[in-house]
Image (tube, helix red, strand yellow):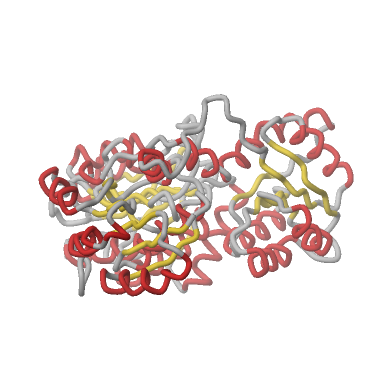
């Protein structure tokens, strides 16, 4: 099937086109109504598209005028038109329907919500509840025959997973990918011939966004290499069990690996379910314009690359403290802070007990310790604790967020980025209750839309943005509401 995607925002067009491509649509893009009409004329030799998605507000020719022109043409009177826009007033949507649209979808939206609209338009079949999905194909790359064997047996026993191949080093892995066509690669970090990081970079160069999970040791060397891999584009990592017998290793794999693999391949299920998973745009809150006194960030799966993109966009000009909870073991967080500081030229370091949270400095919670803010607004200090995990996490973002609210109240700005689970949800609720703001990363740019998705569904976010826009939004708010 073919679709014409019309939107003046390039990121928005890309998001829509990507979601439609997952539903087997071949997409053509246009930036306004006039470009859309020209694109339709160029497509005439191939036949009309099966669907047009159109934004409302665009320069040159807006979406309403485009719809009216199309409905005046006999060839396009019955062409399905889906308007995707930020408008959410019912009277405005009624005007769009009078102009001739068939369905309306509010921004921000999910792939599932888009699929639901296509089901309603008769373009996508409603899946039966008993419909089975193909298993997730996993390619295992590890130089240890023992580990390969345990991984193959343990992962292969799960009916939702299928081992499509194994490789003993990076070169063999790269050679296997075209024939095996995996949905995900489980990649050892330290291997002879070609190591995991070199292999990862080649995977990114040759195979685009193929999901990769690093399988690494918890040694100092392994932790540093894993952080480098995550910053080079790995989607996630799993600590390799050490010093255990085969049965214990298999149990650790079942506990730690299988859930992560499934969390990274969710869109196959989400796109076909036809069930929306986020609230429409009207639930986005309006934030009081109180002075921002500090920024607190929650992130997990996919966090290192997210932080590497978000922090440089606002930290250099920030005049408030910035504190980050990234879910990682103790051996990893110091290396992550060091790499973020080195690659971004930013004042980032792992927090120590008693540190003063200084304006313009980024403090990263150390793995295995909760980070709280204590003291007063003029001189907030860090307190690290070994209190019980929250949301199965230590450090937990909820702990940091709560303490920030106690200190800064409505001057707290929370940012919830990609990650599994719901850490940050309860803390965001407290930020909102105090009058502060919460920015959430959108589904399409998230490696896993768990943590930000929970915040969006709860109606706590006042902005839901692609990763590329999150840091810019923080910078704009700090410029308007600091001093």
Side (left or right) of 379 relative to 39: left
Residue at the extreme right: 145
Q: How many marks?
A: 0
Q: Is residue 398 visible?
A: no
Give the vertical position of 391 relative to 352 (above or below).
Answer: above
Residue at point 86% right, 48% down? 144
Residue at point 70% right, 44% down? 137
Give the vertical position of 195 relative to 275 (above or below).
Answer: below
Query: Foreground: 177 or 417?
Result: 177
Side (left or right) of 113 relative to 65: right
Query: Foreground: 38 or 71?
Result: 71
> Considering the image in quadrants, where does the C terminus appear?
bottom left
Instruction: Name the spot of residue 332 as percent of width and height, x first.
Output: 60, 52
Residue at point 52% right, 72% down? 343
Instruction: Name the spot of residue 214 as percent of width and height, x first.
Output: 68, 52
Give the vertical position of 121 relative to 30 (above or below).
Answer: above
| Quadrant assignment, res 400 | top left
Query: Foreground: 152 or 348?
Result: 152
Residue at point 18% right, 63% down? 482
Query: Foreground: 229 or 202?
Result: 202
Side (left or right) of 294 relative to 126: left
């Amino acid at each position: 099937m073919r679709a014409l995607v019309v939107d003046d925002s390039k990121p928005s067009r890309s998001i829509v086109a990507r979601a439609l491509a997952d539903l087997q649509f071949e997409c053509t893009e246009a930036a306004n109504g006039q470009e859309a009409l020209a694109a339709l004329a160029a497509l005439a030799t191939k036949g009309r598209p099966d669907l047009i998605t159109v934004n409302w507000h665009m320069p040159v020719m807006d979406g309403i005028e485009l719809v009216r022109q199309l409905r005046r043409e006999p060839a396009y009177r019955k062409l399905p038109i889906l308007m995707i826009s930020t408008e959410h007033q019912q009277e405005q949507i009624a005007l769009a329907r009078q102009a001739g649209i068939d369905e309306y979808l509010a921004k921000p939206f999910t792939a599932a919500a888009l699929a639901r609209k296509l089901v309603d338009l008769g373009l996508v079949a409603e899946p039966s509840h008993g419909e089975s999905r193909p298993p997730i194909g996993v390619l295992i790359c590890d130089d240890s025959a023992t580990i390969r064997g345990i991984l193959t047996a343990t992962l292969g026993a799960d009916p939702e997973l299928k081992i499509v191949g194994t490789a003993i080093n990076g070169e063999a892995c790269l050679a296997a990918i075209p024939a095996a066509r995996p949905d995900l690669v489980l990649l050892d970090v330290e291997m002879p011939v070609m190591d995991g990081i070199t292999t990862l970079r080649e995977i990114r160069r040759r195979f685009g966004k193929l999901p990769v999970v690093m399988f690494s040791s918890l040694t100092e060397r392994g932790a540093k290499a894993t952080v480098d891999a995550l910053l080079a584009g790995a989607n996630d990592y799993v600590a390799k069990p050490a010093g255990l017998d085969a049965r214990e290793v298999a149990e650790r794999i079942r506990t730690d690996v299988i859930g992560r693999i499934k969390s990274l391949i969710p869109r196959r299920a989400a796109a076909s379910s036809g069930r929306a998973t986020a609230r429409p745009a009207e639930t986005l809150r309006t934030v009081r314009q109180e002075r921002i006194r500090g920024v607190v960030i929650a992130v997990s799966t996919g966090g290192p690359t997210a932080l590497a993109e978000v922090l440089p966009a606002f930290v250099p000009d920030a005049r408030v403290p910035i504190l980050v909870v990234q879910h990682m073991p103790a051996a990893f967080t110091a290396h992550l802070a060091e790499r973020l500081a080195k690659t971004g030229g930013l004042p980032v370091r792992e927090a120590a007990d008693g540190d003063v949270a200084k304006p313009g400095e980024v403090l990263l919670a150390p793995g295995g310790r909760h980070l709280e803010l204590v003291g007063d607004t003029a001189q907030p200090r860090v307190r690290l604790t070994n209190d019980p995990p929250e949301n199965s996490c230590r450090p937990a973002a909820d702990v940091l967020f709560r303490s920030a609210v106690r200190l800064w109240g409505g001057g707290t700005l929370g940012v919830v980025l990609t990650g599994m689970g719901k850490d940050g949800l309860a803390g965001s609720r407290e930020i909102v209750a105090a009058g502060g703001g919460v920015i959430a990363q959108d589904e399409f740019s998230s490696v896993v839309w768990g943590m930000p998705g929970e915040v969006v569904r709860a109606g706590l976010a006042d902005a839901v943005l692609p990763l590329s826009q999150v840091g810019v939004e923080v910078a704009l708010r700090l410029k308007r509401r600091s001093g």
